[in-house]
Structure formats: structure tokens, C-alpha cells
Image (tube, rainbow, N blue to C red):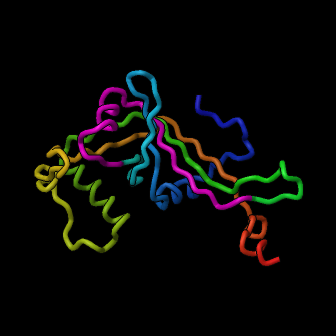
């Protein structure tokens, strides 16, 4: 079901995939609502112990959909530039992407939630906060929007695909150099 037809672009190097999952800052969690309408939301996330973790306000459409239909696709990508070619139809994009398929599970353990939220803080604001998060803070923390507790979700991959088209810098279109010619 989750195979890549263009096998030339498949990335199977576990160290590259792992580094990409750790370094990429934003992923898109894709869901389907009760009318089978797709809904995709960019989120901050952390890759930890072989799973994707992200959080939300504990209310709203994302929360409702994840609780109703937990099957998701989580996508992350990075575009490196446009690969030029003398033949216009052969121009291409240099990129790397990973798609993770699984079910989003809402964490119920406050200590695990605190650990994951700490991992998120460590990723996005390293060394900024002096104290580690505790489960007791997670129990008490409420959104200023609606008073709901924060939700932390975990996606254990049932399938993972990775693709890439890596190019040398000299192969990429450089608008600045082009304008100065």
C-alpha cells in the first residue's frame, strides 16, 4: 500500500532518515474528517524512540478528528532548490521527504507527556529554560483559549517511506548569479 513507484528516488539509508527526522522542524499531520474530507495541519514535532510526538491545545478540529479517526499520515520534507537542465522539461526539484503512516494515540500519562514536551522544548528552545517540566505542571496547565488541558499525541509508524533527489549546488538554479550574467 505504501510503496514508492519511482524507485530511483527511494531513500533507505537509516542514518539519513533518522537525522532528517531529528533535524526537520515542521511536519504535517494529515487526517480525514467524518465526511471523508482531508484535513492537514503543520505542527512542531519531535522524533523520539522511533515515534513522532506532537501537541495541541486539547480542543478544536485537530483534537476532535484525531479522537474520532486516529489513522494519520505524517509528512515532512525539505526542498533544496530547482535542478536546471538544458531541456526545460527535464528541470527537477532537489528534495528529501519522509511519510509516516500510523495511528495517533493521545498520551494519558502526565509524566510521559512532560518528558515529550521537554523534548520539544529542547529541540525548539535549547538551553533556554532552566528547569525540566514535571508531570504535575502538565496536570495543571490549561489553555488560555478555552481552559482545556494540553494534548500530547504519539504516532508509532506502521509504515515509513523516504524519498530524495539530492543535487550538487552547481546543478541548482541560482537566481542571483543568473541576474548578474
> How many numbered discs, if any?
0
Residue at the outermost bottom position: 180
Residue at the outermost front position: 179
Above or below, 114 relative to 162: below
Q: Quadrant of residue 181?
A: bottom right
Q: Quadrant of residue 151?
A: top left
Residue 7 position, x and y percent, is: 72, 41
Above or below, 107 relative to 16: above
Magenta residues (range): 54-82
Q: Is residue 164 left or right of residue 152?
A: right
Q: Is residue 141 left or right of residue 101?
A: left
Q: Quadrant of residue 165?
A: bottom right
Looking at the image, which residue is at 27% across and 60% down? 118
Looking at the image, which residue is at 47% across and 42% down? 74
Q: Is residue 40 left or right of residue 69?
A: right
Q: Is residue 136 left or right of residue 101?
A: left
Residue 28 position, x and y percent, is: 46, 46
Q: Is residue 80 highlighted in magenta?
A: yes
Residue 34 position, x and y percent, is: 38, 22
Residue 88 position, x and y percent, is: 85, 52
Above or below, 15 relative to 98: below
Looking at the image, which residue is at 29% across and 47% down? 56
Name the foreground residue: 14 vs 91. 91
Looking at the image, which residue is at 21% across and 73% down? 130
Residue at the outermost top position: 35
Q: Is residue 117 highlighted in magenta?
A: no
Q: Which quarter of the figure is the N terminus placed in?
A: top right
Name the foreground residue: 120 vs 60. 60
Amino acid at each position: 500500500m505504501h510503496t514508492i513507484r519511482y524507485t530511483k528516488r527511494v531513500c533507505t539509508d537509516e542514518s539519513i532518515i533518522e537525522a532528517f527526522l531529528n533535524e526537520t522542524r515542521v511536519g504535517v499531520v494529515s487526517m480525514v474528517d467524518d465526511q471523508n474530507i482531508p484535513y492537514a495541519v503543520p505542527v512542531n514535532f519531535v522524533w523520539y524512540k522511533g515515534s513522532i510526538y506532537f501537541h495541541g491545545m486539547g480542543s478544536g478540529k485537530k483534537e476532535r478528528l484525531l479522537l474520532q479517526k486516529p489513522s494519520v499520515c505524517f509528512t515532512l520534507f525539505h526542498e533544496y532548490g530547482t535542478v536546471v537542465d538544458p531541456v526545460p522539461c527535464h528541470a527537477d526539484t532537489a528534495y528529501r521527504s519522509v511519510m509516516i503512516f500510523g495511528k495517533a494515540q493521545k498520551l494519558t500519562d502526565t509524566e510521559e507527556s512532560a518528558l515529550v514536551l521537554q523534548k520539544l522544548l529542547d529541540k525548539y528552545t535549547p538551553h533556554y529554560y532552566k528547569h525540566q517540566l514535571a508531570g504535575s505542571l502538565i496536570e495543571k496547565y490549561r489553555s488560555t483559549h478555552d481552559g482545556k488541558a494540553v494534548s500530547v499525541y504519539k504516532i508509532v509508524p506502521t509504515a515509513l517511506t523516504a524519498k530524495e533527489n539530492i543535487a550538487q549546488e552547481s546543478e541548482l538554479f541560482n537566481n542571483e548569479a543568473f541576474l548578474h550574467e
